[in-house]
Amino acid sequence: VGTGGVGKTSLSAAIALAGAGAGRRAAVLTIDPARALGRALGMRALGAELERVVSTPGSLDVGMLEQASAWDAFIRRHAPSRAVEETILANTFYRQLSRRFSGSTEYVALEELCRLHESGRYDLIVLDTPPAAHALDFLRAPARVDRFLEAASASLSSRAQPLVARVLGRVERATGSETFHELAALLTSFQGLFAAVRLRSGESRALAAGDLTAFVLVVGPEANAIAGARELESQMTALGVRLKAIVQNRTHPLPAPLAAASETAPLEAELLARGAPPANLAWIRQAHRSYLAIASAEERHWQALRTSLPANVVSVRVPELGHDLHSLDDLAEVGRLLFTE
Amino acid sequence: VLGKGGVGKSTIAAALLLSLQRAGARVLGIELDAPGGLSRTLGVELPEANVAVRSASGVHLAWFDGALALAEYLSRKVRLGRLATPIFQHPLYEAFVHAAPGVKELMAIGKVRDELLLQKRWDAVVVDAGASGHALEYLRMPAVAAAAFHRGRVHREAKQVHASLSDANITAIHVVTTAEEMPVLEAVESVQRIRSELQLPLGHVILNRCLELPPDDIQATIQSLARLAPDAPMLFSARRALGWIEIQERYAADLERDVGVKPLRMPQLIADELTLLDLETLAPGFTGSARGIS
C-alpha cells in the first residue's frame, strides 16, 4: 500500500521476483503498470490472465487487474444462472457502477487475492494496490460496496418497496434521469447473488486481516510521506491488520558523512587554479548542495520515523538506481537492496 | 490543474494562485472531493465543505463536495420535506450519486462555475483537479450529462456548465508532469483527450521539478575533478545530477514531440517543507506567459 507515485508497482514486482529467486512459487498482481515494467518483465502486454515470466529456481507469474473485467468475471462466477448473468452484465446501471463506484477496484482486488490463494498454486502472492490518496483506502473501500449491497438487498423487502419507488419517482422527475428503472432492474436480478457475495466478502476480509497476510507500506523520500506513516500504523492496528514493513523508496544515499561532504572550497580552488570555468564550478557546487540538502533531510525524517515505530515493524530504505527499471536484472537489484539491509 | 499522482500538482496550483494574486487578482483555490495537497501546501485547514477560508498568504481556499452540492440542489428543487435526511444518508442514494452518469461531477464543476461567474467575488479560480483520469472525468461529465439527460433541469444546467468549460476566455486546463516515463505518458494522453475527445481549451503543459541544465563544456570540468579527487562527494553528486538530467531531457523531448507545444519548465524546489517563499520562486514562471494565466 502507499500513495500514488511512490513506486509500489516496481517494489511489488521486485518482492515477487525475490520470492521466485528463493525458490517460491510467486505471483504478482498489478494495477495499471508502467510500460517499462511490463518490458522489464519481458512481456509485450500485461493481461488479466497470469503469465509466467520466470520459471527457475521458483516461478513468477504476473497479471494485471482490470477493474471492469474483474467485476464481470466475478458476476460470471457467482451468478446462479446464465440468464441472470447476462441481464446483469447488460444493465447500464451495473456498467456504470462496476467501473466507477469508489471502492470497487479494491473490492475485486481482494476477491482476486482470495481466488489466487485458494487455487493453492502459489506460496507468495504480492498484490499491488490501486493508487489512492490515502494508503488505508484499500482497507476501507470494500466496506462501501458491502454497505451498498446491504442497502440494495434491504430495499427489495416488500415493506420498503413502496417508499423507495415513491422517492425514486420524485428524484427522476426532478433530474430528468431514467437511471432508476435500471437500478430497480439490477436489484431484482442481483437478488440471487447477495448471499454468495456477502459470504465472499467475509472470506476476503478474513484473509486480509489474517496471519498469512502482511502489509508493506511504501513511502517516498519526502517529509510529508513520512509524517503520515506513524499515524497510518496505528490506524491499521485499529483495523486489525498487521503492518509488517515500511519501505522508504528511491532514497538518496549520502556519499560521505555530511560534514566532510559539505567541505568543497579547497577542491574548487584547486580546480579554478587549473583553469576550470567558474560557471562550471558554480553548477557543480549547486548540484552538490541540492543533493546534500535532499539526502540529509531524508535521513532526518527517516530517523524520526524509525524511532516512532513499534519494534516489530521492519523498516528498509531502497536507494534509487539512477535510471529507470529496464530489465529483470534491475528488478532483481531492487530486490537485493530490499532484502539485504 | 491536473496530472499524475505525485508530480506536484498542488505545488503548481499554489504557485499559480500566488502569482495571480500578486498581479492583483482576487483568487480562490478549489479542491474537489476532499481537502488535500493544495490546502496543506498553503497551510490552511478546511473543516467544512463549500466554505472559503483565507490563508496566511491572502489566497482563499475551499473544497467542493459534489455529493453535498447535489443534496443541496435536490433539496432546493424537489420538495422532500422530512424525507430529505433519510434519503441523503441512504446507501442507495450514495450508489446513485456514484453511478448516475456524472451527476456528482457535474454538481462540483457547476459550483466552480457559479463561484467564478455568478458570485462576482473572484477574478480567478484555480482548481486542483487531482489525478488525470479522475480530473478528466470531471471535465467530461457536463457534456455526458447534457446528452444522457435529454431534457429537464439537469440537461439545461449541464449545457451551461459545458459552454463555460469550452470557452477559452474563461477556462484553461493546465497539465502537469515530471520528466519520468509514466507521468509523461499520462500527460500526453491527457493532452490528446483534452484536444480531441473533450475539445476543451488546453492551457500550459508544465514540466515540473526540472534540474538546472549544466554549461555545455561541463564534462571537461568533471574529468579534471575525477583526476584530482576520484572519491570526492562533489563528484558523486555532480555525476548523479548529470545522469538524472540525461533522463530528464529524454522525457522532456518525448513530451514536447508528443504534445506539439513547448512545455513550461518549473525548477525543482529543494526544501524540507515548502514555504511560501519557495512557492514564490515558482510564481514568476507563470507571469508574462501565454493566455489564461497572466
Image (cartoon, coloured by chain):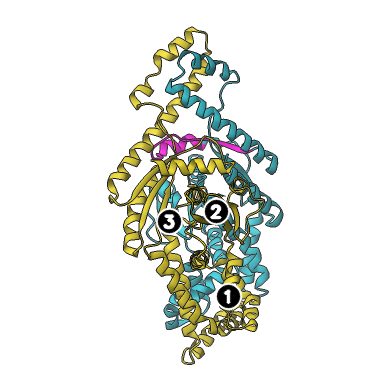
Q: What hue does chain B carry in this figure? A: cyan
Q: Position of residue A207 (x, y in %)?
A: 42, 67
Measured Cα–Cα span from mark 3 to mark 1: 29 Å
Colour of the chain lettered A:
yellow
Q: Are the residues flagged by discs 2 and 1 from a single subunit?
A: yes
Left or right: A299 with respect to A100? left
What mark, if any, has residue A135 been given in the picture?
3
Q: Secondary structure at mark 1?
A: helix
Provide the residue designation for mark 2: A60
Name the amino acid type tagged 3: Ala
Check disc 2 and give the amino acid type. Answer: Leu
Quadrant housing residue A254:
top left
Left or right of A7? Residue A263 is: left
Q: CA distance from mark 2 to mark 3?
A: 26 Å
Q: In terms of sequence position, does the residue under pointer 2 or pointer 3 come before the other?
A: 2
Residue furthest to the bottom in view is A158
Q: Amino acid at mark 1?
A: Arg
For the record, the magenta segment spans B263-283
Residue A77, which numbered label?
A: 1
In the displayed structure, would residue A119 be above or below residue A301? below
